[in-house]
Amino acid sequence: MSAAQIVRFSRRQRIEHALVMACFVLLCLTGFPQKFFTHAWAAALVHLLGGIDWARRIHHLAGYTLAALTVIHFGTGLAGMLTRQLPFSMMPTRKDFEDVFRQLRFYLGELPRAPLYDRFSYKEKFEYWGLVMGNVIMVMTGFLLSFPIQVTAFLPGVLVPAAKMAHSNEGLMAFLVITIWHIFNVHLNPDAFPFDPAIFTGKISRERYEHEHPLELARLEGRPPPAAEAPVAAPGPVRPGGRVGASPAPAGYYLNASRWSVHPVARDGDGLPAGPGLWRRVPAWVALALVPLLGVTFLMFMPVAGFAVLGRHLLLRPGRPPADGG
Amino acid sequence: MHKTLLALSVLLAVSPPGARAADENAACLECHADESMTFDLGGGLTLPLFVDGNAFAKSVHGQAVACTDCHAGMKPDHATGSLPAKTRHELARQASEACRGCHEEAPAEGIHHAVIARGDAGAPACSECHGAHDILAPGSFRTHVPARCGACHAKEAQAYAKSVHGSAIDSNDDVPVCTDCHRVHKDADTSPGALSLRTPVICGRCHTDPKRMAKYGISTNVVATYLADFHGMVTTLQRGTERGPGVKLAAGCTDCHGIHDIQKTDDPRSRVIAAHLQRTCQQCHQGAPAMFPQAWLSHWEPSPRKAPAVWVVRQFYRLMIPFMVGGLVLQIGLHILGVLRKR
């Protein structure tokens, strides 16, 4: 086993995660007793917190902190994208949509190999977009609930109960997704069980990196991607439809329509990512608009994919020998 | 008097335990049937000494309790005696001890007991609510209750008389009288706001009763819809909290609808009709703008007709949560299946 460690999360990302986690725990502890207030445990928990007024104060404080973290996250993200410094590595691409199918079909024994992942697997991208979009809803509705007098000065009052309905339900969904999806995929899955400290230490062993993010590791180490994921098309000149992969390009945002992928080129002459498909230069707003659009689409796609793969498996039983006697 | 004596003598024949009482009471009434008889308490106060023999005979005690059972130690020759009290109220409080002689199980708690315990001598004694010689069986004098309480609580009684409940009291057995909400021997918690926090329970006793509410076309959902909203959540979790400096209690039923002056929700005097609602909200929510009251769904369940925006959000999550969580659990299931298959 190699002792080499690779830094996966920067100090800033680790602090951000710790703060978000603390806020999330506090918000759940002070929020759910309000949602399930008729239960004895809710009354006991509120009593422990020093009464409903204190529970609400803590909830507001944690909420404002999370709102500030969300705004800072969006601000730095947007700044990074506008200066073309930030790779669009969290944006779901066509590979992610396909990876879901391939990974699930691998679990079912339909495919011999699982897909290889880049910096973030589809599971991580789903988690990220779920949290980000959930935060947007929670912060907006929470703000509305915190300032009903100011809000109803210029917006209809019915928004307040609508916001409460959304806040309460979105909070429950966030809690379920975090406790089920995040905790399983990060800590309880057999590869990491019982606990993965990577987000707190920031480091992962090279061996694990090779296993979990081989495409990123290859790029970091200047190697070509592993054979299975090698690009099909070779670099070449500019074609009428756009530029091919790995070719140098003028600064700007490039969309690869066949890969549903956006790539910023920071300086004139920097190379486009290797791989199939043509890269077409697009205006900044198109690139920026595609990011949340694909994020939300991917969120909705994820639960469907599981049912679709299982349904197909049960109906067609692909990869299995025909039953004896036909 | 002769008729009474005759009646009592008939009773005497069939009711030996009452015989002593009947004899004795008749003897007392020889003098106390005189309507003009009074006693000078001093300080300009007079105590009427008249006892209505008929009313007493009809009272719960009329057939079995002798005068001296309560007025202990009174001898036939007390006519020139003195009384150990300066006011009628003081006398009544002394008489309460006599009540307890038989009613030892009567709860020594309740709002007036608590007021007495706080050192306020003005709180009423037994006879000042229940009456002395004209005590009726509990439950048989509902319509008299507001007048009885009003003897001290005049302002509240006047407001009540004009309310939707009080104005119907003579013709309607369903409306609550004072003691239906203020259960004097049960609800002893006098801490500030305790009663307000309990209004969903108190009002709910009648307003969630389908039989009673059907007669008036009033929804029995009012408590459930209240609890489903912010105020209901907070009051539930505030149970046991005292109102005080810096401690506000969330609105209970009476904070919006009024207490003794409660009106039908379509009465122009009601605090909760649309025209008054903004002002009612402003009691707590200072500066609430005109659109603020719409934030309260007026006890309506969200539906496509009432508050469709809220209904749409609810339906969305009713589908989305099982869909999303189910989809993820399925994928985790497939993951575990894959791990097991490899083994």
Image (cartoon, coloured by chain):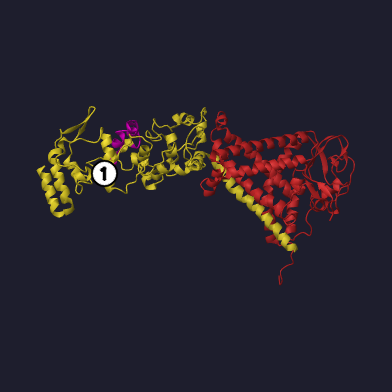
Chain colours: A red, B yellow
On-image quarter of the N terminus of chain A: bottom right
Query: Which residue occupies 18% across, 39% down?
Result: B51
Q: Is residue A217 visible?
A: yes
Left or right, residue B245 beside residue B86 = right
Q: Tell me the magenta residue range.
A: B142-165
- Which of the pair B25/B53 is nearer the observer? B25
Q: Which residue is mark 1?
A: B98
> Can you give x and y, in whole percent of width and height, for residue B231 in the image?
50, 38
- Snapshot quadrant of residue A274: top right
Q: Nearer the viewer, residue B169 or B88?
A: B88
Residue at horizontal 31 percent and vertical 34 percent from the top: B150
Instruction: Report how many numbered discs are placed on residues in the image.
Output: 1
Residue A266 placement (x, y as % from top left): 83, 35
Residue at 39% in and 47% down: B210
Horizontal relation, residue A149 to residue A193: left or right: left
Q: Amino acid at mark 1?
A: Ala
The relative height of residue A117 versus residue B131 in the rendered view (above or below) is below
> Looking at this view, is B80 or A151 the one in front?
B80
